Image (cartoon, rainbow, N blue to C red):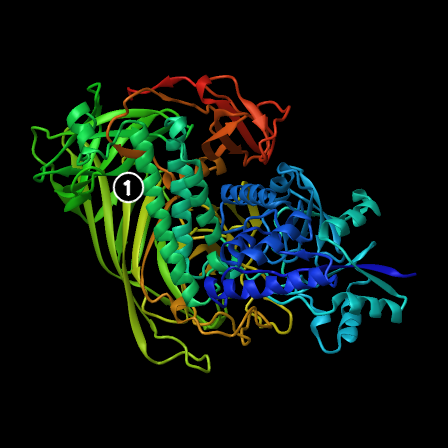
Amino acid sequence: MTKDVAVVVQTHWDREWYYPHQTFLARLLRVMKHVVEQLDAGQLQGFLFDGQVSAIEDFYRAAEPVLAQRVSQYVKAGHIVIGPWYIMADEFLSSGESLVRNLELGMARAAKHGYCQRIGYLPDTFGHIAQMPQILCEFGIDEAVVWRGIDAKQSEVVWQAPNGSSIFTAFLTEGYYQHPFNTADWCGALDAYLEKIVNCSGGELLLTQGGDHLLTVEDLQKKIDLYNAEQDEYRLVQRSLEDHIGRLRRNGTRLELPVVNGELRDNQLTFVLPDVLSTRQYLKVQNQLVEDRLTGQIEPLLAISQPEQYPRHYLEKTWQLLIEQQAHDSICGCSIDEVHREMEVRFSQLHQRLDALQHQAQMALGMRNDCLSAHRNWGAPSPFADDSQFTLFNPSPKSRQGWQCFDLFLSGRERTNITLRTVAGESLPTVLLGTEKCSEFHSPVDDFPEKVAGYRYLVAINFRLSGLQMVACEAIEPNWAKPAVAAAEWIENSYYQISVNGDWLQLTDKRSGRCYEDMLSLVSEMDAGDTYNFSPVGEKEYRAEIVSARGRCFDSENLGVQVQVLDIGFRLRQPQGLTEERNIQDERVESSGRLRLRLMPDDDLIEAQLDWHNNARDQRLRLHFALGQLVADTSADCAFHWLKRAKVYRDSAPVSGQREAPVAVFPSQSAITAGPLGFVHRGLHEGEIVSVAGEDRLAVTLVRSVGWLSRTDLKTRGLGAGPNLATPEAQCLRPHKFEFAFTLQKPESRTLLNRANSWRKPVMGLRGHVATACPELHLQENSLQVSSLRSIEWDGVPTLELRLWNPSGGQVEAKFNTAGFTRVDLSGRALNETMVVTPHQIATFIIPLAKLPFGGGAL
């Protein structure tokens, strides 16, 4: 019986990887000219442009008008297939909200260009998040094509998300990069490929003809006709991917297919390249910082400003720039050095755009003003104003309370102390933690720029704010003296006592009475890997020694409360790197840093900042947290999901061929629990459980120093994962800043996720006072997690959109301080569902701004 084979001609197009973006763009112009010529000649029936839109938009901006018009015609006719993604992002290093905006932007742009493919095409991402089927289904997509991460014997499966959403999935058992027609012996290469896959499918077979950045093959249809004429075992037909999936689904039922559940990171059949989670960590930190500012602060602030001034186009372009940074070879850090230097510039540009958006929102709210004439003539705020009048704004619909640090700039002479209060006269509990002389530069749009000299004050403030609440405050100089800063040998609050005992950081948990003799340490080991995979060299580890420790108690005389800080100096003597033969060098270098631990009054979360200067090559530096026990599993968050994973110790046995060592590291977006420990972070995605002296520790990667994009001599991966190119800047010989926090109170998932969200997306201290009342929204169910809150237009009406997700296995009702919500899916389509959010479900609610209560004022 003749077996049908769909030939889907495709390319996987990285905007940047082993060449920088502009070099790949020039290559793209040549490839697309070739594609058009073959479409014109009838040798090519269709061309799958990698399931994303960014590359075609790059092409349109750079191509000659005549060629761009021909491509546009083929896109509108469905012969050049784009979408649904804007870019092929890494699923574990992008937040769930970023993935939603990626798909939202990709589908909208593809439709604007003429046609959008409605298949979740994910051929080359390094594993897949558990909630991807739910995300796709909510956009009306119930089919996917994937490669890495699945351990299945057949090419058609049902992929099910934790909430029960499922999609028909074509598994590329041999990968997407297949180009038998490009080879000299193309008949033999085709026979060999078909022999591998013939028993993997119960229906039509699939050949994804093409590869990364490759020209389409000459005379393809002639070769297909010749192959079909010379044998009767297979019949090859050029098809679109949508046609092929449609034929598979019509010829079989989903009930007969095996089901794969949740997260896909299995590497038995193909590499998942797990250590991209920690390569060039500085990129991950910047990515999450921009995500946090954009979704956790800027969009909520814009949402309560005046709708007629809403910067939709500028905001969309900001999202586009961020999403482009999240392309899998970009955010994973596994490109050439030039690519990542350009990424750092773009992250700087993103922060500039976010600053501009915040300023624009404050202008719309009457908090700030950039016209000197408006200040003089109509009493608008001065363009040169400082923070003597400021506003606390809670950007979350959940209530926030407790201590948080803020920077306030006050012009003029140094104040020995400051008092903060609301404009209603209520005192804000405040502790002054530091003062720094500085100046600000301001440029009104109608007059000369000026520098304003003054001091920046780091203050801890205790507050309680309801959802989206704004409270106008002011800073005044008190009539009492600056409180003394007392030195101490240890720091403590009602939960912990922390001290240094020789080279050990000792922590006593006052609630349990447990003493952790070596609570936190910095440990390095040699790494002969590349940007994709860690590869160990020997068993020796190098531990940083403590060289100094200084405790300080910042007191507030009028409150009787203290904020306590412990500064610890570390020094790490370690090998300089590896020789060309991958042996450990005899020379030693010294890396050093300072860890600052801060205890807030009556708070179980220990805040930490580590400033580290790495001087060593070919090594991996990690935080080790003592757990005081053996653990069976860990839990962590990924996009819209809280996931428990069984403990896996590292297997150091070398592998060869098409094998990769079993995956021991695990990803997290913001939080991890292991035994008694709860850990929250920004940009420290890679965790692992390691055994030390008979007990388990949580190891969190800080720096992975490697000098090659890919190598072929790793113990942990049998073959190369990319070009064998040197990447000396991936050694990360530079200063690093890491921020994290931890607790030893065995936190529940919702408690830790709430703390992580508050810590990552804190209450804002905004310059100026709001001129009018603002809308407020209170989410009364604390277990639901907030993904985003933004302003959209729905049926032409300015509307607030709130996206939540349920991390638990039980259903939860979303309750608010007002009625009038409509439930919608991720694409904005109205649903008939209630306010109940089922287990592991993503839930999006919208409400017209006019229906929200307005308020603000008192704490």
**Left or right, residue 625 beside residue 188:** left
- Compare residues 94 and 18 and report the one nearer the observer: 18
Q: Is residue 234 left or right of residue 151?
A: right
The quarter of the rendered structure image containing the C terminus is: top left
Q: Position of residue 371 (x, y in %)?
A: 21, 33
Q: Residue at x 83, y 54 (%)?
A: 202
Q: Residue furthest right?
A: 1
Choose top left, top right, bottom left or bottom right for residue 459.
top left
Q: Total label count?
A: 1
Q: Is residue 594 above or below residue 359?
A: below
Q: Residue furthest bottom?
A: 581
At 70% from the left and 60% from the top, the residue drawn is 40
Q: Is residue 126 visible?
A: no
Q: Quadrant of the N terminus?
A: bottom right
Q: Which residue is mark 1?
A: 599
- As rendered, which of 834 and 572 lies closer to the eye? 834
Please indicate whether residue 854 sits to the left or right of residue 190 in the image.
Answer: left
- Residue nearer the viewer, 169 or 755: 169
Question: Amino acid under label 1?
Answer: Leu
Classify 10 Å Cα crowding around label 1: few (below 14), some (14-19), many (20 and above): many
Residue 20 horizontal/vertical position (percent): 46, 65
Residue 344 against residue 423 in the figure, above or below: below
